[in-house]
């Protein structure tokens, strides 16, 4: 019995240190990385749009004495989409890890009638699908930059820009599931979990 207790003691110590979100750290990582994914992709598409419409904008830039170039816009577009593709692997990985450890508030349904498990399942499927889409968009963007349109002033096709705008809409819809997990089920929301456990927030939170 003492031998078993010795083996399990490190596990018990870790369990005792889990925060209100049942995570081994106080602040959830996934919600923060999500904003990197959305922000990087949105900036990438926005700057590629700016590069695509540069002939209409350049007089305004000259009037404002802004030393911008069309290739500069497309450089920002490419590197932001590339960075988004890399960071989204960590976003999805952190999401799965924290979802496995999550303990949603019981007996609650979202505004569309889903329970916590169904909402997490669809959020997970959507996250993996978006990761694959972002990777495909990044590969597509790379081929345009280095092969297909390297000699063109406009480095991206209109189809690419249209798909990019559509992906941003999908991110918004998918983000609603994550928002419901937080607002309705208390996932990643420390105060909700502490209140559910009957804790005094004034004593626990700084």
Image (tube, rainbow, N blue to C red):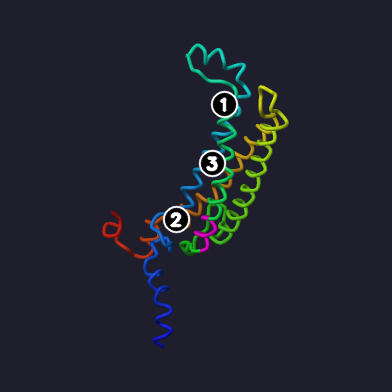
Front in this rendered view, residue 111 or 36: 36
Q: Earlier in the sequence, mark 2 or mark 1?
A: 1
Q: Secondary structure at mark 3?
A: helix
The x, y position of residue 95, in whole percent, is 53, 55
Residue hosting label 3: 38
Mark 2 vs 3: CB contact within 8 A: no
In this view, which residue lies farthest toward the right? Answer: 148
Quadrant, the C terminus? bottom left
> Is 159 within the magenta?
no
Q: Residues within 10 Å of mark 2 (few under 14, many from 20)?
A: many
Residue at image location 65% in from the left, 48% down from the top? 132
The x, y position of residue 52, in whole percent, is 63, 24
The x, y position of residue 198, in whole percent, is 34, 65
Residue hosting label 2: 188
Residue 14 falls left or right of residue 51:
left
Q: Secondary structure at mark 2?
A: loop
Residue hosting label 1: 73
Quadrant in the picture for residue 77: top right
Q: Residues within 10 Å of mark 3 (few under 14, many from 20)?
A: some
Q: What mark, if any, has residue 144 been given in the picture? A: none
The x, y position of residue 2, in whole percent, is 39, 86
Quadrant, the N terminus? bottom left
Residue 99 falls left or right of residue 54:
left
**63 versus 71 height, above or below:** above
Span of residues in magenta: 94-100
Q: Nearer the viewer, mark 1 or mark 3?
A: 1
Front in this rendered view, residue 68 or 173: 68
Mark 2 vs 1: CB contact within 8 A: no
């Amino acid at each position: 019995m003492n031998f078993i207790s010795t083996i399990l003691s490190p596990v018990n110590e870790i369990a005792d240190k889990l925060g209100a979100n049942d995570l081994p750290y106080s602040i959830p990582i996934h919600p923060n990385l999500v904003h990197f994914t959305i922000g990087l992709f949105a900036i990438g598409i926005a700057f590629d749009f700016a590069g695509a419409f540069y002939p209409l904008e350049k007089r305004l830039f000259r009037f404002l004495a802004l030393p911008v170039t069309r290739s500069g816009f497309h450089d920002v577009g490419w590197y932001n989409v590339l960075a988004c593709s890399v960071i989204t692997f960590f976003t999805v990985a952190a999401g799965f890890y924290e979802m496995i450890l999550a303990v949603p508030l019981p007996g609650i349904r979202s505004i569309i009638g889903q329970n916590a498990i169904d909402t997490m399942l669809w959020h997970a499927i959507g996250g993996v699908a978006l990761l694959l889409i972002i990777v495909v968009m990044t590969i597509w963007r790379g081929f345009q930059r280095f092969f297909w349109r390297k000699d063109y002033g406009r480095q991206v096709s209109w189809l690419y820009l249209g798909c990019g705008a559509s992906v941003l809409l999908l991110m918004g819809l998918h983000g609603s599931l994550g928002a419901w997990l937080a607002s309705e089920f208390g996932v990643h929301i420390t105060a909700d979990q502490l209140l559910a456990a009957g804790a005094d927030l004034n004593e626990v939170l700084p």
